[in-house]
Every structure is written in C-alpha cells, then in structure tokens.
Image: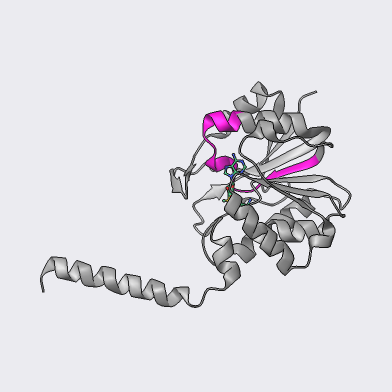
Amino acid sequence: MNVNFKELLKWFIKRIRKKIRSYSFTSQDRRHSKVGLIGDWKEKREFQINFLRSIDLKPTHFLLDLGCGTLRGGIPIIKYLNERNYTGIDVRAKVIKEAKKELKLYHLEEKKPKLIYFKKFNELKFSKKFDVIWAFSVLIHLKDEMLDKCLEFIRNNLKQDGRFFCNVNVTPNEKLWRDFPLILRSLEFYENKARKHNLKIQIIGPAEVGIYYRFNDPEIKHPIIKFTKIE
Ligand SMILES: C[S@@+](CC[C@H](N)C(=O)[O-])C[C@H]1O[C@@H](n2cnc3c(N)ncnc32)[C@H](O)[C@@H]1O
C-alpha cells in the first residue's frame, strides 16, 4: 500500500472515530469544552468548590470569579454563597452567554449573581471590594502586559484583608489554548510581579491545605498561589 494512502486512511479513521465519539457528548460537555478539555468539567467543578471551602470561603463572602467562563466552576460557588455575593467576569461574550444558560439550567437566577462581559479591566467598576478573588486557569493565559493590568485591578478591588487565589503553570509545556497563549512562568516571576503591585504571594501546596492541582497528565502541576496586600 502506498504510504500516503496509508496516512490518509489513518487520518480518515481518526476523523470518523472523533465524529462517533462526539455523538455521546451532552450539551453541557459541549458548553464546558469552550473553557477546557471536553469531558472533565465535573472534576474541575468539584475541585474549585472544594478548594474554596478549604480556604474558608464563607457564604457571606463577596467573591469575584475572574475569567468565570461558562460557570464550569461557578455553579456550586453560586449555590454556596449568599444572594448577590458572586460576580463572574470574562473577556469572551460567547462564554458569558453560555454561563447564563448554565445558570438557568440549575435554576440559580434567584441567587442574583452578576455575570459580566468586559474588554478592559479599567472598564470595570464595583461598588464593593471583594473578600476573595478566584482565577482558575486564567493567569496562565495572560501575556505579561495583561498580567500587570490584572494584578493592578486585583489590588484595587480586593478588601484590605482580602485574598486572591489562582493556579499557575510551572511545568515546561508552553503552547496555545484557543485564542490565548498558555504560559509557563516561574514562581519567582509571580513573586516579583506581586511586589510591583504592592502584593505578596504564598504558595498553597500540600503542606498547607493538601491541594496541588493536577491536570490529567500527572506531570503537569499547577500550584495555587495566594496574593494578599502588603500593608
Ligand atoms: C481555561 S478557562 C477557565 C474558565 C473558568 N475559570 C473555569 O474554571 O471554568 C480561562 C478563561 O479565562 C478567560 N480569560 C482570558 N483572558 C482573560 C482576561 N484578560 N480577563 C478575564 N478573563 C480572561 C477566557 O475567556 C476563559 O473563559
């Protein structure tokens, strides 16, 4: 058999398999595939609420989910928090649209979360500062300039004793994800950036709360960092 024909046949079989597999996906699988790998949204949802409860998030806390996407993580957080205490923001209109559908699916509109599509951090104005800001798998997609704007925004919108948690990528595997880069940076890099914005960081790892987020590949570790104000 000609090699090119063999390759073509392999490619064709792969396409057919993918198509067949796609019939088994639910509409929720498809929705959450806009923010990550198809099929693992339940695990990522559970991880986020468990982590936030482990750092003592209280229903009375005012939380900002920065880069909330399709509410893959947001649904149990909204359920847990008191009415009006959840705000989700994202730079993609299409994921905010999906987030609103997800909210409806769980009949959680009565919790009155705010879901905001925005383009630039300086457009966002909030009447209250946040106790907790959470960014799951977001900072790893921000280029340096955007990361600076993001930390400046966080510094301005966090209560004096507020805490900002995020996971970062310190495993060498830089590539593209959707329209965003996937960026590896050292912990020292985040430490320096934090200092620049008058923030300090602490690594939340196994020693502190027993959480060190792992994606499907056990080699890819995304430690969680806590940022707090210096004074
Ligand atoms: C990997 S997804 C994670 C979504 C959500 N945190 C979750 O766990 O399901 C990253 C999200 O960050 C959003 N994003 C990218 N750049 C952003 C920025 N500058 N500000 C806010 N969100 C951003 C993307 O649109 C995307 O929805």
- Establish if 26 lies above or below 219: below
Report how many numbered discs are placed on residues in the image: 0
Q: Can residue 72 be seen in this view?
A: no
Q: Which residue is drawn at 54% across and 38% down?
A: 142
Q: Which residue is drawn at 67% across and 60% down?
A: 45
Q: Is residue 49 left or right of residue 57?
A: left
What percent of the width, then of the height, locates residue 182?
Answer: 48, 43
What percent of the width, then of the height, locates residue 41?
Answer: 60, 63
Q: Which of 114 and 184 is in front in this view?
A: 114
Say whether residue 212 is magenta: no
Say whether residue 141 is magenta: yes
What percent of the width, then of the height, locates residue 34?
Answer: 54, 57
Q: Is residue 126 left or right of residue 94?
A: right
Q: Which residue is drawn at 48% across and 77% down?
A: 23
Q: Is residue 143 left or right of residue 117?
A: left
Q: Residue at x 52, y 64 (%)?
A: 38
Q: Which of 229 and 202 is in front in this view?
A: 229
- Most extreme residue toward the left, as rendered? 2
Q: Is residue 167 visible?
A: yes
The residues colored magenta run 131-148
Q: Which of 126 and 131 is in front in this view?
A: 126
Quarter where residue 27 is shown: bottom right
- Establish if 194 lies above or below 34: above
Q: Quadrant of the N terminus?
A: bottom left
Q: In which quarter of the image is the C terminus?
A: top right
Q: Which of 190 and 66 is in front in this view?
A: 66
Task: Give the color scheme: rainbow, by chain, secondary structure or one colour.
Answer: one colour
Quarter where residue 157 is shown: top right
Quarter where residue 16 is shown: bottom left
What percent of the width, then of the height, locates residue 168?
Answer: 58, 42
